[in-house]
Image (cartoon, grey):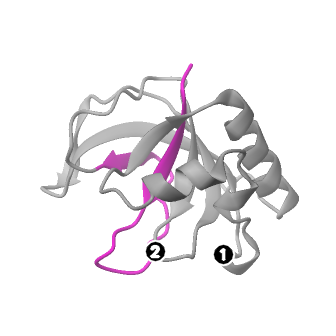
Amino acid sequence: MTYWLKLWGSGKGRYQPLPTDHLTFGKGGKPGVESGDRLVILGVGTNGKLLAIATATSGITLPGTSPDQPYRCASRLDLVCGNVDRAPAYTVIPGADQLRQWLKTPADHRTITEAQFLAAEAAVLAAGGKAPAA
């Protein structure tokens, strides 16, 4: 199992709500996401807020939704912060200084350690993160 920090949204617009059944990935090479991997979702345009925790339910096997998002995987949302303003900032993750440097790159996902994932998951839960309504 691999842990990921995944940006959601684009610099072209404000944060868009997450789909409940898939995630898309931008250009820059096929992501290494596999079924069972866990992802922390950081919303673009939210001042670095951790908005959700997801589990990949497939590898990268489906086409993306647009030329800017050519890769896709099926996923399940496990925890979602219903209020973006109350969502925790990425600075709760150990090593946030290194993550801040990564946020300045065009990549939309990167691996993180289990400890970083667990810290983010605990912060989302503490901020009121809940399983999405079915």
Q: Amino acid at mark 1?
A: Val
| Residue under numbered circle 2 | 15
Main secondary structure along the magenta-highlighted residues = loop
- Give the residue at x 82% y 64%: 127
| Residue under numbered circle 1 | 84
Of callouts 2 and 1, which one flags the residue occurring earlier in the amino acid sequence? 2
* Residue placed furthest toward the left: 67
x and y percentages locating residue 42 in the rendered image = 55, 59
x and y percentages locating residue 87 in the rendered image = 72, 68
Label 1: few (<14), some (14–19) or many (≥20) C-alpha neighbours in 10 Å? some
Considering the numbered disc 1 on the image, is that residue within a helix, a strand or a loop? helix
- Give the residue at x 72% y 48%: 120
Say left or right for 37 vs 105.
right
Report which quarter residue 88 is drawn in: bottom right
Q: Which mark is residue 19?
A: none
Q: Amino acid at mark 2?
A: Tyr
Tell me, yes or no, whether the two marked residues, 2 and 1, touch with CB atoms within 8 Å: yes
Q: Is residue 19 visible?
A: no
Does residue 5 sit above or below 88 in this rendering? above
Q: Which residues are magenta?
A: 1-25
Instruction: Check residue 114 for magenta coloring.
Output: no
User: In which quadrant is the N terminus drawn?
Assistant: top right
Report which quarter residue 72 is drawn in: top left
Label 2: few (<14), some (14–19) or many (≥20) C-alpha neighbours in 10 Å? some
- Give the residue at x 37% y 51%: 108
x and y percentages locating residue 24 in the rendered image = 33, 49
Instruction: Check residue 23 for magenta coloring.
Output: yes
- Give the residue at x 83% y 63%: 128
x and y percentages locating residue 101 in the rendered image = 47, 56
Alpha carbons under labels 2 and 1: distance apart: 10 Å
Considering the numbered disc 2 on the image, is that residue within a helix, a strand or a loop? loop
